[in-house]
Amino acid sequence: MANDRTTADAQSLFDRGHQSLQSGDFPEAVECFTRAIRLKPNIAAGYRFRALAYLELGQRIDALNDLDQAIRIRSDDPMLYADRARVLYRQRSFPAAIADCDRALGLDPGLAPLHGLRGECHAANGETQKAFADFAVAMEQDPQNLADYLIARAELHLELEDYDAALADADSAADRNPESPTVYQTRGMIHRALDNETEAEADFTKTLELDPERVLAQLARATVRLSLKRFPEALADCDAVIAALPTLAKAYEIRGMARKFSGDSAAALADYNEAIRLNPGSLLAYNLRAGIHYQHRQYNKAIQDHLEALKRDPKSAGTFNQLGWIWATAPDPDVRNGTRAKECATRACELTEWQEAGFLDTLAAACAELGEYDDAVKWMEKAIGIAPEHEDDYRTRLELYEREKPFRGNSALTPRP
Protein backbone atom coordinates (compact mmCIF):
# COMPACT_ATOMS: atom_id res chain seq x y z
CA MET A 1 0.00 0.00 0.00
CA ALA A 2 2.80 2.43 0.93
CA ASN A 3 4.61 1.50 -2.27
CA ASP A 4 1.49 2.31 -4.29
CA ARG A 5 1.26 5.70 -2.62
CA THR A 6 4.96 6.41 -3.27
CA THR A 7 4.45 5.54 -6.93
CA ALA A 8 1.40 7.79 -7.14
CA ASP A 9 3.22 10.68 -5.47
CA ALA A 10 6.20 10.27 -7.77
CA GLN A 11 3.91 10.20 -10.82
CA SER A 12 2.13 13.34 -9.63
CA LEU A 13 5.44 15.13 -9.20
CA PHE A 14 6.61 13.88 -12.58
CA ASP A 15 3.43 15.18 -14.24
CA ARG A 16 3.83 18.57 -12.55
CA GLY A 17 7.46 18.71 -13.62
CA HIS A 18 6.50 17.92 -17.19
CA GLN A 19 3.88 20.68 -17.17
CA SER A 20 6.41 23.15 -15.76
CA LEU A 21 8.91 22.12 -18.43
CA GLN A 22 6.38 22.72 -21.18
CA SER A 23 5.26 26.08 -19.74
CA GLY A 24 8.86 27.32 -19.38
CA ASP A 25 9.07 27.30 -15.59
CA PHE A 26 12.38 25.46 -15.54
CA PRO A 27 13.35 25.98 -11.85
CA GLU A 28 9.99 24.52 -10.85
CA ALA A 29 10.52 21.64 -13.27
CA VAL A 30 13.90 20.87 -11.69
CA GLU A 31 12.33 20.94 -8.22
CA CYS A 32 9.49 18.59 -9.20
CA PHE A 33 11.73 16.10 -10.97
CA THR A 34 14.20 16.18 -8.05
CA ARG A 35 11.43 15.28 -5.60
CA ALA A 36 10.16 12.58 -7.95
CA ILE A 37 13.67 11.10 -8.22
CA ARG A 38 13.96 10.95 -4.42
CA LEU A 39 10.81 8.85 -4.34
CA LYS A 40 11.70 6.71 -7.39
CA PRO A 41 15.45 6.88 -7.98
CA ASN A 42 15.50 4.07 -10.55
CA ILE A 43 13.26 5.68 -13.17
CA ALA A 44 15.36 6.95 -16.09
CA ALA A 45 12.72 9.40 -17.33
CA GLY A 46 13.04 11.54 -14.20
CA TYR A 47 16.73 12.10 -14.85
CA ARG A 48 16.16 12.65 -18.56
CA PHE A 49 13.56 15.36 -18.15
CA ARG A 50 15.42 17.02 -15.30
CA ALA A 51 18.40 17.14 -17.66
CA LEU A 52 16.26 18.94 -20.23
CA ALA A 53 15.25 21.50 -17.57
CA TYR A 54 18.88 21.94 -16.54
CA LEU A 55 19.78 22.58 -20.18
CA GLU A 56 17.22 25.36 -20.42
CA LEU A 57 18.81 26.92 -17.34
CA GLY A 58 22.28 26.68 -18.92
CA GLN A 59 23.48 24.05 -16.43
CA ARG A 60 25.06 21.65 -18.92
CA ILE A 61 27.23 19.75 -16.46
CA ASP A 62 24.19 18.97 -14.30
CA ALA A 63 22.36 17.89 -17.45
CA LEU A 64 25.20 15.58 -18.46
CA ASN A 65 25.32 14.04 -14.99
CA ASP A 66 21.59 13.31 -15.16
CA LEU A 67 21.84 11.81 -18.63
CA ASP A 68 24.76 9.64 -17.48
CA GLN A 69 22.59 8.33 -14.66
CA ALA A 70 19.61 7.78 -16.97
CA ILE A 71 21.81 5.76 -19.34
CA ARG A 72 23.07 3.64 -16.45
CA ILE A 73 19.43 2.78 -15.72
CA ARG A 74 18.27 2.36 -19.35
CA SER A 75 21.28 1.57 -21.49
CA ASP A 76 19.04 0.41 -24.34
CA ASP A 77 17.18 3.72 -24.80
CA PRO A 78 18.44 5.47 -27.99
CA MET A 79 16.84 8.79 -27.04
CA LEU A 80 19.06 9.07 -23.98
CA TYR A 81 22.18 8.76 -26.13
CA ALA A 82 20.67 11.23 -28.60
CA ASP A 83 20.02 13.76 -25.82
CA ARG A 84 23.51 13.35 -24.42
CA ALA A 85 25.03 13.71 -27.89
CA ARG A 86 23.30 17.08 -28.29
CA VAL A 87 24.67 18.30 -24.96
CA LEU A 88 28.15 17.04 -25.76
CA TYR A 89 28.01 18.85 -29.11
CA ARG A 90 27.17 22.09 -27.33
CA GLN A 91 30.09 21.39 -24.99
CA ARG A 92 32.30 20.96 -28.07
CA SER A 93 33.11 17.39 -27.02
CA PHE A 94 32.80 16.22 -30.59
CA PRO A 95 34.35 12.70 -30.42
CA ALA A 96 32.15 11.84 -27.43
CA ALA A 97 29.08 13.25 -29.19
CA ILE A 98 29.88 11.17 -32.30
CA ALA A 99 30.17 8.05 -30.12
CA ASP A 100 26.72 8.71 -28.63
CA CYS A 101 25.24 9.30 -32.08
CA ASP A 102 26.70 5.95 -33.17
CA ARG A 103 25.12 4.20 -30.17
CA ALA A 104 21.73 5.83 -30.70
CA LEU A 105 21.69 5.03 -34.43
CA GLY A 106 22.79 1.49 -33.69
CA LEU A 107 19.74 1.09 -31.45
CA ASP A 108 17.38 2.97 -33.79
CA PRO A 109 18.60 3.60 -37.36
CA GLY A 110 15.46 5.64 -38.01
CA LEU A 111 16.66 8.64 -35.96
CA ALA A 112 17.39 10.65 -39.09
CA PRO A 113 18.08 13.99 -37.31
CA LEU A 114 21.03 12.35 -35.58
CA HIS A 115 22.75 12.02 -38.94
CA GLY A 116 22.57 15.80 -39.18
CA LEU A 117 23.96 16.22 -35.67
CA ARG A 118 26.70 13.67 -36.28
CA GLY A 119 27.52 15.46 -39.54
CA GLU A 120 28.01 18.72 -37.67
CA CYS A 121 30.23 16.92 -35.15
CA HIS A 122 32.31 15.40 -37.95
CA ALA A 123 32.60 18.82 -39.61
CA ALA A 124 33.75 20.44 -36.36
CA ASN A 125 36.20 17.58 -35.87
CA GLY A 126 37.74 18.08 -39.33
CA GLU A 127 36.26 14.87 -40.80
CA THR A 128 34.75 16.50 -43.87
CA GLN A 129 33.91 13.44 -45.96
CA LYS A 130 32.09 11.80 -43.06
CA ALA A 131 30.25 15.06 -42.49
CA PHE A 132 29.12 15.27 -46.12
CA ALA A 133 27.96 11.65 -45.99
CA ASP A 134 25.89 12.25 -42.87
CA PHE A 135 24.32 15.41 -44.28
CA ALA A 136 23.31 13.50 -47.41
CA VAL A 137 21.57 10.80 -45.34
CA ALA A 138 19.84 13.40 -43.15
CA MET A 139 18.56 15.26 -46.21
CA GLU A 140 17.17 12.09 -47.72
CA GLN A 141 15.58 10.69 -44.55
CA ASP A 142 14.40 13.92 -42.90
CA PRO A 143 13.16 16.27 -45.66
CA GLN A 144 11.12 18.25 -43.13
CA ASN A 145 14.37 19.75 -41.82
CA LEU A 146 16.11 19.95 -45.19
CA ALA A 147 16.88 23.68 -44.87
CA ASP A 148 18.79 23.07 -41.64
CA TYR A 149 20.96 20.42 -43.25
CA LEU A 150 21.56 22.57 -46.30
CA ILE A 151 22.80 25.39 -44.08
CA ALA A 152 25.04 23.03 -42.11
CA ARG A 153 26.52 21.80 -45.38
CA ALA A 154 26.83 25.37 -46.68
CA GLU A 155 28.84 26.30 -43.58
CA LEU A 156 31.17 23.38 -44.21
CA HIS A 157 31.59 24.41 -47.87
CA LEU A 158 32.33 27.95 -46.66
CA GLU A 159 34.99 26.68 -44.26
CA LEU A 160 36.54 24.73 -47.14
CA GLU A 161 36.42 27.90 -49.30
CA ASP A 162 34.15 26.23 -51.86
CA TYR A 163 32.07 29.37 -52.11
CA ASP A 164 29.99 28.42 -55.15
CA ALA A 165 28.80 25.21 -53.48
CA ALA A 166 28.17 27.08 -50.24
CA LEU A 167 26.08 29.72 -52.00
CA ALA A 168 24.06 27.10 -53.88
CA ASP A 169 23.17 25.36 -50.61
CA ALA A 170 22.31 28.64 -48.90
CA ASP A 171 20.09 29.71 -51.80
CA SER A 172 18.28 26.37 -51.66
CA ALA A 173 17.83 26.74 -47.89
CA ALA A 174 16.37 30.23 -48.36
CA ASP A 175 13.88 28.87 -50.89
CA ARG A 176 12.77 26.18 -48.45
CA ASN A 177 12.74 28.27 -45.27
CA PRO A 178 12.51 31.99 -46.11
CA GLU A 179 11.76 32.91 -42.50
CA SER A 180 14.96 31.53 -40.99
CA PRO A 181 17.41 34.20 -39.77
CA THR A 182 20.19 31.60 -39.71
CA VAL A 183 19.79 31.04 -43.44
CA TYR A 184 20.31 34.71 -44.26
CA GLN A 185 23.13 35.16 -41.76
CA THR A 186 25.02 32.22 -43.27
CA ARG A 187 24.38 33.39 -46.82
CA GLY A 188 25.55 36.86 -45.83
CA MET A 189 28.86 35.39 -44.67
CA ILE A 190 29.21 33.55 -47.98
CA HIS A 191 28.50 36.71 -49.98
CA ARG A 192 31.04 38.53 -47.85
CA ALA A 193 33.67 35.88 -48.61
CA LEU A 194 32.88 36.38 -52.31
CA ASP A 195 33.21 40.18 -51.91
CA ASN A 196 29.54 40.54 -52.82
CA GLU A 197 29.21 43.34 -50.29
CA THR A 198 25.80 44.65 -51.41
CA GLU A 199 24.26 41.17 -51.31
CA ALA A 200 25.91 40.51 -47.94
CA GLU A 201 24.46 43.69 -46.47
CA ALA A 202 20.99 42.74 -47.72
CA ASP A 203 21.23 39.30 -46.12
CA PHE A 204 22.44 40.65 -42.78
CA THR A 205 19.65 43.23 -42.84
CA LYS A 206 17.12 40.46 -43.48
CA THR A 207 18.63 38.48 -40.60
CA LEU A 208 18.09 41.40 -38.25
CA GLU A 209 14.55 41.98 -39.49
CA LEU A 210 13.72 38.38 -38.58
CA ASP A 211 15.70 38.39 -35.32
CA PRO A 212 16.81 41.80 -34.01
CA GLU A 213 18.79 40.12 -31.22
CA ARG A 214 21.40 38.67 -33.60
CA VAL A 215 24.25 40.87 -32.45
CA LEU A 216 26.93 39.14 -34.51
CA ALA A 217 24.88 39.64 -37.67
CA GLN A 218 24.79 43.35 -36.87
CA LEU A 219 28.55 43.39 -36.39
CA ALA A 220 28.96 41.59 -39.72
CA ARG A 221 26.75 44.22 -41.35
CA ALA A 222 28.90 46.94 -39.80
CA THR A 223 31.97 45.36 -41.39
CA VAL A 224 30.28 45.24 -44.78
CA ARG A 225 29.11 48.85 -44.50
CA LEU A 226 32.67 49.83 -43.61
CA SER A 227 33.86 48.18 -46.83
CA LEU A 228 31.14 50.04 -48.73
CA LYS A 229 32.43 53.32 -47.16
CA ARG A 230 29.09 53.97 -45.51
CA PHE A 231 30.70 55.04 -42.30
CA PRO A 232 27.76 56.61 -40.39
CA GLU A 233 25.74 53.41 -40.84
CA ALA A 234 28.72 51.28 -39.82
CA LEU A 235 29.12 53.43 -36.71
CA ALA A 236 25.44 53.05 -35.84
CA ASP A 237 25.71 49.27 -36.12
CA CYS A 238 28.83 49.20 -33.94
CA ASP A 239 27.19 51.41 -31.33
CA ALA A 240 24.26 48.98 -31.15
CA VAL A 241 26.59 45.98 -30.85
CA ILE A 242 28.65 47.63 -28.10
CA ALA A 243 25.50 48.55 -26.21
CA ALA A 244 24.48 44.88 -26.27
CA LEU A 245 27.96 43.37 -25.80
CA PRO A 246 30.25 46.00 -24.25
CA THR A 247 33.16 43.57 -23.87
CA LEU A 248 33.29 42.49 -27.54
CA ALA A 249 36.71 43.71 -28.67
CA LYS A 250 36.00 43.20 -32.37
CA ALA A 251 33.20 45.79 -32.24
CA TYR A 252 35.68 48.42 -31.03
CA GLU A 253 38.09 47.51 -33.83
CA ILE A 254 35.40 47.96 -36.48
CA ARG A 255 34.07 51.16 -34.90
CA GLY A 256 37.60 52.50 -34.66
CA MET A 257 38.09 52.00 -38.38
CA ALA A 258 34.78 53.70 -39.17
CA ARG A 259 35.78 56.62 -36.94
CA LYS A 260 39.20 56.88 -38.53
CA PHE A 261 37.81 56.94 -42.04
CA SER A 262 35.27 59.52 -40.87
CA GLY A 263 38.18 61.75 -39.84
CA ASP A 264 37.97 61.28 -36.07
CA SER A 265 41.36 59.74 -35.34
CA ALA A 266 41.22 60.60 -31.61
CA ALA A 267 38.02 58.58 -31.17
CA ALA A 268 39.49 55.81 -33.31
CA LEU A 269 42.54 55.66 -31.07
CA ALA A 270 40.29 55.37 -28.01
CA ASP A 271 38.48 52.44 -29.62
CA TYR A 272 41.73 50.66 -30.49
CA ASN A 273 42.99 51.17 -26.94
CA GLU A 274 39.78 49.61 -25.61
CA ALA A 275 40.02 46.72 -28.06
CA ILE A 276 43.56 45.97 -26.87
CA ARG A 277 42.48 46.22 -23.23
CA LEU A 278 39.66 43.74 -23.83
CA ASN A 279 41.71 41.41 -26.03
CA PRO A 280 45.47 41.87 -25.56
CA GLY A 281 46.08 39.03 -28.02
CA SER A 282 44.55 40.88 -30.97
CA LEU A 283 46.93 41.23 -33.91
CA LEU A 284 44.57 43.56 -35.76
CA ALA A 285 44.06 46.01 -32.91
CA TYR A 286 47.80 46.64 -32.55
CA ASN A 287 48.22 47.13 -36.30
CA LEU A 288 45.24 49.48 -36.41
CA ARG A 289 46.59 51.54 -33.53
CA ALA A 290 49.95 51.64 -35.27
CA GLY A 291 48.19 53.17 -38.26
CA ILE A 292 46.91 56.03 -36.10
CA HIS A 293 50.40 56.62 -34.67
CA TYR A 294 51.82 56.58 -38.20
CA GLN A 295 49.19 59.06 -39.37
CA HIS A 296 50.30 61.40 -36.57
CA ARG A 297 53.96 60.84 -37.49
CA GLN A 298 54.62 59.04 -34.21
CA TYR A 299 56.76 56.50 -36.00
CA ASN A 300 58.40 54.88 -33.00
CA LYS A 301 55.03 54.23 -31.40
CA ALA A 302 53.81 52.73 -34.67
CA ILE A 303 56.86 50.48 -34.87
CA GLN A 304 56.36 49.34 -31.28
CA ASP A 305 52.74 48.40 -31.96
CA HIS A 306 53.67 46.47 -35.10
CA LEU A 307 56.33 44.61 -33.12
CA GLU A 308 53.69 43.77 -30.50
CA ALA A 309 51.50 42.48 -33.32
CA LEU A 310 54.30 40.21 -34.51
CA LYS A 311 54.53 38.72 -31.03
CA ARG A 312 50.90 37.65 -31.48
CA ASP A 313 51.49 36.27 -34.98
CA PRO A 314 55.12 35.86 -36.05
CA LYS A 315 53.96 34.91 -39.56
CA SER A 316 51.83 37.97 -40.25
CA ALA A 317 52.91 39.07 -43.72
CA GLY A 318 50.90 42.27 -43.44
CA THR A 319 52.65 43.28 -40.25
CA PHE A 320 56.09 42.64 -41.73
CA ASN A 321 55.06 44.74 -44.71
CA GLN A 322 53.92 47.64 -42.52
CA LEU A 323 57.15 47.62 -40.54
CA GLY A 324 59.14 47.51 -43.77
CA TRP A 325 57.22 50.48 -45.14
CA ILE A 326 57.89 52.63 -42.09
CA TRP A 327 61.61 51.78 -41.97
CA ALA A 328 61.93 52.35 -45.72
CA THR A 329 59.93 55.54 -46.25
CA ALA A 330 59.49 57.49 -42.99
CA PRO A 331 60.42 61.17 -43.51
CA ASP A 332 62.38 61.11 -40.23
CA PRO A 333 65.95 59.92 -40.97
CA ASP A 334 66.36 58.78 -37.37
CA VAL A 335 63.54 56.29 -37.93
CA ARG A 336 64.54 54.91 -41.33
CA ASN A 337 66.50 51.67 -41.39
CA GLY A 338 67.00 50.26 -44.85
CA THR A 339 68.44 46.97 -43.67
CA ARG A 340 65.51 46.22 -41.38
CA ALA A 341 63.09 47.45 -44.01
CA LYS A 342 64.47 45.03 -46.58
CA GLU A 343 64.44 42.15 -44.10
CA CYS A 344 60.79 42.76 -43.23
CA ALA A 345 59.66 43.34 -46.80
CA THR A 346 61.48 40.23 -47.97
CA ARG A 347 59.81 38.17 -45.25
CA ALA A 348 56.40 39.55 -46.23
CA CYS A 349 57.05 38.58 -49.86
CA GLU A 350 58.25 35.11 -48.88
CA LEU A 351 55.11 34.50 -46.82
CA THR A 352 52.93 35.44 -49.81
CA GLU A 353 55.07 33.64 -52.41
CA TRP A 354 56.06 36.92 -54.06
CA GLN A 355 52.55 37.43 -55.43
CA GLU A 356 51.40 40.44 -53.36
CA ALA A 357 52.04 43.62 -55.33
CA GLY A 358 51.85 45.91 -52.32
CA PHE A 359 54.56 43.93 -50.56
CA LEU A 360 56.81 44.10 -53.63
CA ASP A 361 56.22 47.86 -53.61
CA THR A 362 57.54 47.95 -50.04
CA LEU A 363 60.54 45.80 -50.97
CA ALA A 364 61.32 48.18 -53.82
CA ALA A 365 61.17 51.15 -51.41
CA ALA A 366 63.52 49.31 -49.01
CA CYS A 367 66.00 48.60 -51.79
CA ALA A 368 65.87 52.26 -52.81
CA GLU A 369 66.55 53.31 -49.22
CA LEU A 370 69.68 51.12 -49.35
CA GLY A 371 70.73 52.62 -52.69
CA GLU A 372 70.01 49.36 -54.53
CA TYR A 373 68.13 51.08 -57.34
CA ASP A 374 68.42 48.32 -59.94
CA ASP A 375 66.63 45.96 -57.53
CA ALA A 376 64.12 48.67 -56.65
CA VAL A 377 63.24 49.04 -60.34
CA LYS A 378 63.00 45.27 -60.77
CA TRP A 379 60.59 44.80 -57.88
CA MET A 380 58.53 47.83 -58.87
CA GLU A 381 58.11 46.49 -62.40
CA LYS A 382 57.05 43.11 -60.99
CA ALA A 383 54.47 44.84 -58.78
CA ILE A 384 53.03 46.65 -61.81
CA GLY A 385 52.81 43.31 -63.65
CA ILE A 386 50.84 41.74 -60.80
CA ALA A 387 48.54 44.71 -60.14
CA PRO A 388 48.22 46.85 -63.28
CA GLU A 389 45.22 48.59 -61.73
CA HIS A 390 47.69 50.40 -59.45
CA GLU A 391 50.09 51.26 -62.25
CA ASP A 392 49.72 55.04 -61.96
CA ASP A 393 50.70 55.01 -58.29
CA TYR A 394 53.44 52.43 -58.75
CA ARG A 395 54.88 54.13 -61.84
CA THR A 396 55.35 57.35 -59.89
CA ARG A 397 57.69 55.50 -57.55
CA LEU A 398 59.29 53.55 -60.40
CA GLU A 399 60.30 56.82 -62.05
CA LEU A 400 61.88 57.96 -58.78
CA TYR A 401 63.95 54.79 -58.56
CA GLU A 402 64.98 55.08 -62.20
CA ARG A 403 66.33 58.53 -61.29
CA GLU A 404 68.06 56.91 -58.28
CA LYS A 405 65.94 58.67 -55.70
CA PRO A 406 64.25 57.04 -52.68
CA PHE A 407 60.57 57.43 -51.82
CA ARG A 408 59.37 59.35 -48.78
CA GLY A 409 55.78 59.16 -47.65
CA ASN A 410 53.34 59.04 -44.78
CA SER A 411 50.48 56.89 -46.08
CA ALA A 412 49.19 54.78 -43.21
CA LEU A 413 48.86 51.14 -44.16
CA THR A 414 45.64 49.87 -42.61
CA PRO A 415 44.59 46.22 -43.03
CA ARG A 416 41.08 45.31 -44.06
CA PRO A 417 38.69 44.36 -41.24
Image (cartoon, rainbow, N blue to C red):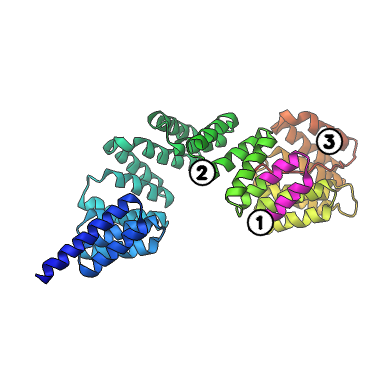
Q: Quadrant of the N terminus?
A: bottom left
3 or 2: mark nearer the eye: 2
Residue found at x 50% / y 36%: 207
The CA span between labels 1 and 2 is 37 Å
1 or 2: mark nearer the eye: 2
Find numbered disc 3 in the image and state the secondary structure of the residue it sits on.
Answer: helix
The CA span between labels 3 and 2 is 49 Å
* Viewer-closest of 175 and 7: 7
Q: Quadrant of the C terminus?
A: top right
Q: Which amino acid type is marked by label 3?
A: Arg
* Viewer-closest of 104 and 398: 104
Mark earlier in primary sequence (3, 2): 2
Q: Is residue 85 visible?
A: yes
Residue hosting label 3: 397
* Viewer-closest of 307 and 340: 307
Q: Position of residue 352 (x, y in %)?
A: 65, 44
* Residue 290 painted magenta: no
Q: Position of residue 94 (x, y in %)?
A: 39, 55
| Magenta-colored span | 255-279
* Residue 275 painted magenta: yes
Residue hosting label 1: 314
Residue found at x 41% / y 54%: 90
Circle number at residue 351: none
Q: Residues within 10 Å of mark 3 (few under 14, many from 20)?
A: many
The CA span between labels 3 and 1 is 29 Å
Residue hosting label 2: 213
